[in-house]
Image: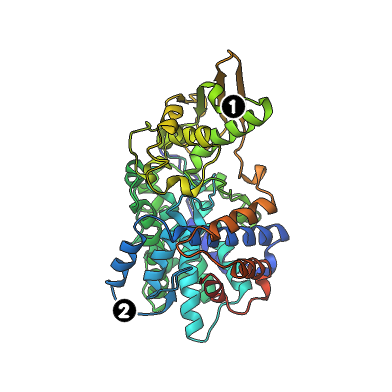
Amino acid sequence: MSLVKDVTANPVDRLAEHVVSTRFSDLDAATTAKGKTFLLDTLGVAIAGTSGAKIDELMATVRSWGSGDDARVLLTGERLPAQGAAILNAYQIHCLEFDCVHEGAVVHPMATILSAVLAHCERRSASRKPVSGRDLMLALTLGVDVAAFIGMASKAPIRFFRPATCGGFGAVAALAKLEGMDVPTLKSAFGGMYGQTSGTLQAHVEGSPVLGLQIGFNARGALSAVDLAGAGFRGPHDVLTGQYGYFRLFEQDQFDVAERWRDLGDVFQMTRLSHKPFPSGRLTHGVVDALRQLMARHGFAADDVTSVVATVPPLTFRLVGRPDIPNPEANYAKLCLRFVAGLYLAHGHVDVLDFRGRERLDDPRVHAFAAKVDVQLDTTNPDPNALDPQHVTVRLTSGASHDIDLLCTFGHPDAALTDEENLSKFRRCAALGRIPLPASSVERLIEMVSAIEQLDNAADLVGATLA
C-alpha cells in the first residue's frame, strides 16, 4: 500500500527553494559549531582512509580513466581530474566505516558531499574564483539537509545504499549553492543526478569494497550533473515523486514528505548527525556501547561473560545480524554485530588497526566471544529504519544477569562525544594514514576548521592535509 502524502506539488521545488534562499546568516551558532565538528571529523577519517583496502589499485585505475590535475587526493596529494579526486576522496572517507551518519535518514551524508565539494573548490581555486570558508560551510549544511530530508521521508525498509543515493542529491545541492544556481537550474541538476543515481546494498551484504566506491560514484555524478545543468542541459524535474521518481522506485512507493519535512528550514540537519566512535557499521555500535556501560557499572570482566543477547530493531537485525564466519574480510567483519562485540570483549576496544591484517580478523579469542552473542529481532518496533531503542542482556558465570535499554547510542546527538573526544578521534585518525600527518599540520587543520569563517580559499583545507 502506498504511503504517499502531500505530493500535489513537486517536493523538489521546496528543496530547491530552501537551497537557493538560505544564507550563511540564517545558520545558528549550534549549526555552525556542528558543521565545524563534522568537517574536521570527515577530514580525519579521510586521512586514515588513505590506508584502506585497495587504495593503490583504485588510484591506478582512476588514473587510467583520463588525464587532468584539477584536484588533489587528501593527504597524499596526487593530482587528478576533479571527478577522479572526488571518487578517491569519497572512498577514503567511507572505506573504514568511520564517517558520521544521520540516523533518521540512514545516510552518511558528508562522505559524498564533502568529496564532491572539495574537488569543486580546488578547480574553482585554479580558475581564480575561490570558495570562501563561509560559503563552504553553508553549502555543506544545505547538502546535508537535502540528503537527510530525502532519506527521512522514506517509510520503506532500506534496500538501496542511501549514503550513496541520497548523498548524491545532497552533493548537487551543495555544489549548486556554490555556483549560485537558481531554482530551475538546480532542479535540472537534481534531474541530472537522478539519471546517475546508484548504490546497491548487495555490496553491504557481501562486505565488498564497492560499498564505499558507490559513494564516490555519486560524488562524481553530482559534479557531472551540476556541470551539465550549468551548461543548459535540462534534466527531469519531478525526480522524487514523479511516475518513475526516486521515492516510487528506490523507496518502493512508501514515503511521507509532509510528516518528515516539517522541520525543513527550521532545524538544520547538521545538528542531528551522529559521530562514529568506532570504525564499524553504526548498527554495531549499540552492543559495544551497552557492553562498555555495563562493564563500567558492574565491574565484570570479559571472561566472566557467558552470553550476550542483543534485542535490536529490524534495520539492525537485517543488516548486521549476520553470522560470524571464519576468516572474514575486514569489510564483512565491520558490518557483523557478533564479530564487533566479540572484538570488544576480547580486546577492550574497536580500533582501525583491529581490521588491518589477519591478526584480529582470525583471532580465536574474538570468534569465541562472538559465538556467545545472540542477535534477536525486536518484533515490537514497527519502524524499518530505526536504529534504536536496543535492549542488551549480559549473563555471567556467577549466574548474575545485567541488562540495559539504549534509547540512543554513544555518538548520537543526544549522547554526543565531548569536544575532547572529537579532537582525540581526529588526532588518532591523522596518525593512521599511509603517511602520518605531522603534528604541526594536525594542529593547523584544527585551527583552520575552527576559524572556517575567516578562510578565504576553502581549497586550502586540502593543502593542509598534505603530509
Quadrant of the rendered structure where residue 332 is?
top left
Quadrant of the rendered structure where residue 329 is?
top left
Count neighbours of disc 1 (C-alpha within 10 A) and say few if under 14, some if 14 to 19, many if 20 or more. Answer: few
Disc 1 marks a residue whose amino acid type is Ala
Spatial CA distance of label 2 from label 1 is 56 Å
Q: Position of residue 94 (x, y in %)?
A: 45, 55
Q: Nearer the viewer, mark 2 or mark 1?
A: 1
For mark 1, give the secondary structure: loop
* Residue with the mark numbered 1: 301
Asked if the residues shown at circle 2 and circle 1 are in contact, with their CB atoms under 8 angstroms apart, the answer is no
Q: Position of residue 163 (x, y in %)?
A: 44, 52
Q: Does residue 397 lie above or below 14 as drawn?
A: above
In the image, 146 versus 204, the foreground residue is 204
Task: Single out the residue that lies furthest toward the left.
Answer: 64
355 relative to 125 in the view: left or right = left
* Residue with the mark numbered 2: 67
Q: Is residue 425 visible?
A: yes
Mark 2 / mark 1, whichever is N-terminal:
2
Q: Position of residue 456 (x, y in %)?
A: 62, 79
Task: Single out the residue that lies furthest toward the bottom.
Answer: 128
Count neighbours of disc 2 (C-alpha within 10 A) and say few if under 14, some if 14 to 19, many if 20 or more. Answer: few
Q: Does residue 48 lie above or below 358 as drawn?
A: below
4 relative to 461 in the view: left or right = left
Q: Position of residue 278 (x, y in %)?
A: 53, 45
466 relative to 58 in the view: left or right = right
In the image, 396 versus 338, the foreground residue is 396
